[in-house]
Image (cartoon, coloured by chain):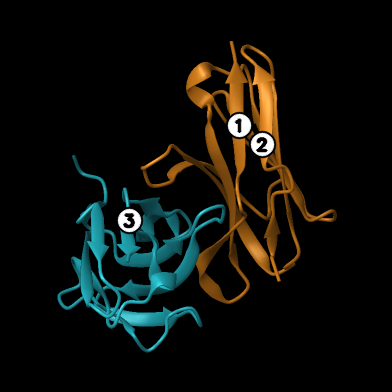
Chain colours: A orange, B cyan
């Protein structure tokens, strides 16, 4: 039973355009959400996070949106750059567990 | 480099052998976590420590797995009698109290291959 779902295994976006990565969750007790970026043979790198009391958080080119009623969050990257090509993981915490629950990841490919 | 470090980065072992991994968290991070990641999946939580106390264990952590953080600094994860299904990337993360423990910072991982 997957509590955090990333339904797009891969996404291809042209350099300079907006990349939108989506994530859905089923556990309404989750109260904090995070996005991580992962290159091959490296550990996940923390990108941006959002608390369930907010609906938007912005950091430079990265913005995360949270829609609690739909149990959906998205990561926007504007403008997309070649170095953004990586696997992006959505993660959630809360609901009585201190470990993070991850989705399966979306492989973002930025085309020149 | 003041990030989370893990040793070794790669380990190849034969089925039935014991292996031990080490994690050094970011200095002053109270919490330390272990995760396992297999191909095509996201990291899966195994266990975590607050200082030297092990506070939570996942159902994934079978009896063959044991983790310690004896002095509240580095941690070790031991797998006894390894099986081929243990082949995975083992990730360590640490988290500071200042972020309410919400944000976890990961090390580069130890890739285990069981032959």
The mark found on residue A10 in the picture is: 2
- Please indicate whether residue B48 sits to the left or right of residue B16 in the image: right
Can you give x and y, in whole percent of width and height, for residue A10 in the image? Answer: 66, 36
Question: Does residue B40 appear left or right of residue B61 in this picture?
Answer: right
Residue drawn at 32 percent across, 73 percent down: B50
Residue in the image at 78% along x and 56% along y: A71
Q: Are marks 1 and 2 in contact (CB under 8 Å)?
A: yes
Q: Distance between the residues labelled 1 and 2?
A: 6 Å
Q: Nearer the viewer, residue B20 or A44?
A: B20
- Occupied quadrant, residue B104: bottom left
Q: Which of the 4 image quadrants contains residue A88?
A: top right
Q: Which of B94 and A84 is in front in this view?
A: A84
The local crowd at label 3, few if under 14, some if 14 to 19, many if 20 or more residues have their Cα within 10 Å, is: many
Residue B111 disc label: 3
Specify whether disc 1 shares its chain with disc 2.
Answer: yes
Q: Name the residue under label 1.
A: A108
Residue B25 in sight from this viewpoint? no
Instruction: Kindly identify which chain the residue marked by label 1 belongs to.
Output: A
């Amino acid at each position: 039973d997957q509590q955090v779902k990333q339904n797009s295994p891969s996404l291809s976006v042209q350099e300079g355009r907006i990349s939108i990565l989506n994530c859905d969750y089923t556990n309404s007790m989750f109260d904090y959400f995070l996005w991580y970026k992962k290159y091959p043979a490296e550990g996940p790198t923390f990108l941006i996070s959002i608390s369930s009391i907010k609906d938007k958080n912005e950091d430079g080119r990265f913005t995360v949106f949270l829609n609690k009623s739909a149990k959906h969050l998205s990561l926007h990257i504007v403008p997309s750059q070649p170095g953004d090509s990586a696997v992006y993981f959505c993660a959630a915490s809360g609901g009585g567990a201190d470990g993070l629950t991850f989705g399966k990841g979306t492989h973002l490919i930025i085309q020149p | 480099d003041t990030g989370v470090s893990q040793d070794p980065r790669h380990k190849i072992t034969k089925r039935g052998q014991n292996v031990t991994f080490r994690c050094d968290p970011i200095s002053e991070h109270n919490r330390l976590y272990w995760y396992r990641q297999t191909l095509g999946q996201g990291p899966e939580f195994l266990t975590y420590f607050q200082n030297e106390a092990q506070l939570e264990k996942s159902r994934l952590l079978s009896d063959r797995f044991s983790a310690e953080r004896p002095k509240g600094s580095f941690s070790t994860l031991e797998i006894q009698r390894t099986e081929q299904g243990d082949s995975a990337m083992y990730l360590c993360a640490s988290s500071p109290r200042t972020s309410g423990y919400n944000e976890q910072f990961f090390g580069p991982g130890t890739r285990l291959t069981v032959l």
